[in-house]
């Protein structure tokens, strides 16, 4: 239980009696919030300094979303680190606010000095009178029985006639007296940290999710005559996706597709009458961003698609692409929302030498900016009304940062459970800036990180503070735009390697349909574009075709759902492998523990349930060479796992069920990419006890 506190900021900030520095977590001097997941425990730390030898007291003040009053949690001091810390559990989604207050603990200083003098056999008569003054001061802020108790204590400390010195000393050191003083004594040097800091708390799916990207228009049977797929077809395929273990189904734009300059197959400029065009060229006579491509079906069909996904435990993520085809209604109704060239024409999108004649970028800084931004916001609210709570935002780095900060805040103020996923394959500082200003999660450079050294270097940054405080990476093994050379040249073993890495390095990952079939034909040598790209044509598939890796995907997703270590973000650490082609890392399990919180009376209680619960740790060894067998000695971090140097312990491969007994730091691994590209090793440490109670291993 936490204590409610009134806001005394004005008094606290008149003068800084104490120094409060290096508060954590804090991002860019409080300019941006840090990110957490509902149920997380936030450890707030601070350096708090004061002259002299007086005791200091401190607390964390915080407000939960929707609360108007401040609550507090007492901070504790660690003499070894010279650091004050407190923990609080964020138990609802939304924006939390917190700061730190500190003051001279005059009662604690007095009590400590009194104890020392009593132990030394010194006269404490004067000290007892000082204590009475403190008790009377505290009584001024108390009421009723509490006030009476403090006044009686003050009189008892002053009473030299009816009480012995020993009785007065006992009363002075009474724990009930201390509890009343901690609750009611008002310091005169209360100092508050100069900033209120914020934490955005998201739902669990913002951290842990398995994404499957699919074009509904291709979801027809390959055996039937070629036709445009519908939401009815896609709904029938949802059971397959759920059976593979995915929980987010991501759809490219589902809106009417422009006809002017429509792209043909393989991105050719001259489309044939039957060509379906790129879904990212949004808008025609049938509507724009709040309409559905008629060939896909009706809104009723879409609503049934969303409902069926929800029944299967999945959510629908929708592409939010803020651009228009030349046929979009906005082009006729609001031509000023676009960039007008010197000849009066509207500028189409370009990324020289590439040209996107079928797409008009929006001018977010046009004179009618307010109405434009509101219209873009209303698109999101419209689809939220149809059950969509996840948006994959297309190329957000080409739109103003100020727009994203505004629109995300606008939407999440009404719908805090909405997730914004940034598709920003851009320079690192831009990607991080988008994450700071509001995006829930982001694509990463994972598709291009194929060498073990580069994977280790990149993910050591992503999974550790300060980056992990605001940036949540989602590891897509492929996308409609990215067919990496590693997959082209590595074949089926390479797909299995990348699947294992994507699903274990960080807790959220995704694949684009066709990955399970190991599709890897590029448009041309050295290109990352697919031949017969689904961006420009229908591509029905037989998902049980030869060479598929459905079993790998299903097994991996089941393991991820079962084991907490694979659902956490900041528990990744890399460890030595004597063969540079084999990557070796640990996903650390967690330990349940008690916490100290201040109750309404000001007392501090310790909650420490028995027995302690441990979530098992998982060691991962992956052969990143898809072409040949590799073997090595891996160095197990015994200390991190609570294993002694000479203890034997069992590791169980969750992919195959095989068990191995290891001992010591160096242990042997052999991986044939054609058979098993990696080990996913659940660690069974030697038997552990806590007193007489066994430790429970709980996935």
Image (spheres, rainbow, N blue to C red):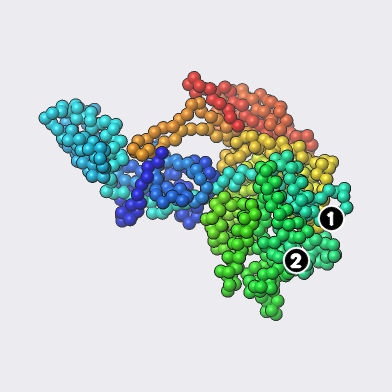
> Residue at left 63%, top 61%?
379
The picture places residue 642, in percent across and down from the top left corner, at 55, 28
The quarter of the displayed image where residue 672 is located: top right
Quadrant, the C terminus: top right
Give SS at disc 1.
Answer: loop
Neighbours of disc 2 within 10 Å: few (<14), some (14-19), many (20+): many
Residue 415, can we see it? yes
> Residue at left 74%, top 68%?
285
> Residue at left 80%, top 48%?
519
> Residue at left 49%, top 19%?
692
Disc 1 versus disc 2: nearer the observer: 1
Would you say 167 lies left or right of 230 here?
left
Neighbours of disc 1 within 10 Å: few (<14), some (14-19), many (20+): some
Q: Which residue is mark 2?
A: 258
Identify whether 102 is placed above or below 131.
below
Q: In the displayed image of the protein, which residue is found farthest to the top?
A: 692
């Amino acid at each position: 239980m936490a204590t409610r506190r009134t806001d005394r900021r004005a008094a606290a900030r008149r003068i800084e009696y104490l120094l409060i520095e290096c508060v954590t977590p804090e991002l860019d001097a409080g300019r941006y919030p840090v990110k957490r997941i509902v149920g997380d425990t936030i450890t707030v730390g601070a350096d708090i300094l004061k002259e002299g030898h007086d005791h200091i007291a401190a607390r964390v003040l915080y407000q939960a979303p929707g609360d108007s009053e401040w609550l507090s949690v007492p901070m504790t001091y660690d003499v070894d680190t010279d650091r004050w810390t407190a923990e609080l559990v964020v138990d609802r989604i939304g924006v939390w606010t917190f700061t730190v207050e500190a003051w001279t603990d005059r009662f604690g200083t007095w009590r400590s000095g009194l104890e020392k003098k009593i132990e030394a056999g010194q006269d404490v008569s004067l000290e007892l009178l000082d204590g009475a003054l403190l008790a009377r001061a505290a009584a001024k802020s108390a009421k009723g029985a509490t006030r009476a108790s403090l006044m009686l204590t003050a009189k008892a400390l002053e009473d030299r006639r009816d009480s012995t010195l020993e009785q007065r000393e006992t009363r002075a050191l009474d724990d009930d007296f201390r509890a009343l003083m901690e609750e009611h004594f008002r310091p005169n040097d209360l100092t508050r940290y100069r900033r209120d800091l914020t934490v955005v708390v998201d739902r669990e799916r913002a951290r842990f999710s398995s994404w499957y990207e699919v074009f509904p228009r291709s979801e027809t049977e390959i055996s039937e005559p070629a036709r445009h797929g519908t939401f009815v077809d896609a709904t029938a395929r949802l059971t397959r996706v759920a059976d593979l273990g995915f929980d987010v189904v991501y759809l490219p734009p589902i809106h009417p597709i422009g006809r002017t300059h429509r792209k043909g197959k393989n991105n050719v400029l001259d489309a044939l009458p039957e060509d379906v065009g790129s879904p990212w060229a949004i808008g025609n006579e049938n509507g724009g961003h709040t309409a559905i491509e008629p060939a896909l079906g009706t809104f009723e069909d879409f609503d049934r698609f969303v409902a069926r996904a929800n029944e299967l435990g999945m959510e629908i993520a929708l592409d939010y692409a803020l651009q228009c085809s030349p046929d979009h209604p906005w082009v006729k109704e609001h031509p000023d929302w676009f960039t007008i060239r010197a000849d009066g024409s509207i500028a189409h999108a370009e990324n020289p030498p590439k040209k996107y004649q079928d797409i008009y970028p929006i001018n977010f800084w046009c004179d009618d900016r307010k109405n434009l931004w509101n219209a873009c916001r209303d698109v999101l609210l419209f689809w939220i009304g149809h059950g969509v709570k996840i948006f994959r935002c297309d190329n957000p780095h080409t739109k103003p940062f100020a727009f994203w900060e505004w629109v995300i805040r606008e939407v999440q103020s009404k719908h805090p459970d909405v997730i914004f996923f940034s598709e920003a394959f851009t320079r690192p500082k831009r990607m991080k800036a988008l994450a700071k200003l509001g995006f829930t999660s982001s694509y990463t450079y994972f598709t291009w990180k194929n060498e073990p050294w580069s994977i280790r270097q990149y993910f050591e940054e992503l999974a550790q503070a300060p980056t992990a405080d605001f940036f949540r990476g989602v590891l897509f093994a492929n996308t409609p735009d990215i067919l990496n050379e590693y997959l082209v040249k590595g074949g089926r073993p390479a797909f299995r390697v990348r699947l294992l890495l994507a699903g274990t390095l960080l807790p959220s990952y995704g694949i684009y349909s066709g990955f399970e079939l190991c599709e890897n034909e590029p448009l041309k040598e050295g290109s990352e574009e697919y031949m017969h790209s689904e961006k420009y044509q229908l591509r029905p598939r037989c998902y049980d075709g030869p060479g598929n890796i459905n079993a790998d995907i299903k097994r991996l997703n089941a393991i991820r759902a079962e084991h907490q270590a694979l659902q956490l973000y900041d528990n990744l650490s890399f460890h030595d492998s004597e063969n540079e082609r084999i990557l070796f890392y640990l996903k650390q399990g967690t330990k349940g523990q008690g916490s100290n919180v201040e109750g309404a009376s000001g007392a501090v209680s310790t909650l420490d349930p028995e027995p302690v619960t441990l979530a098992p740790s998982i060691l991962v060894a992956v052969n990143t060479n898809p072409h040949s067998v590799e073997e090595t000695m891996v160095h197990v971090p015994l200390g991190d796992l609570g294993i002694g140097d000479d203890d034997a312990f069992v590791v169980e491969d969750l992919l195959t069920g095989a068990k191995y007994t290891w001992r010591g730091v160096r242990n042997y691994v052999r991986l044939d990419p054609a058979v098993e590209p990696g080990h996913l090793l659940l660690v069974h440490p030697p038997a552990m006890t806590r007193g007489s109670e066994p430790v429970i291993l709980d996935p």
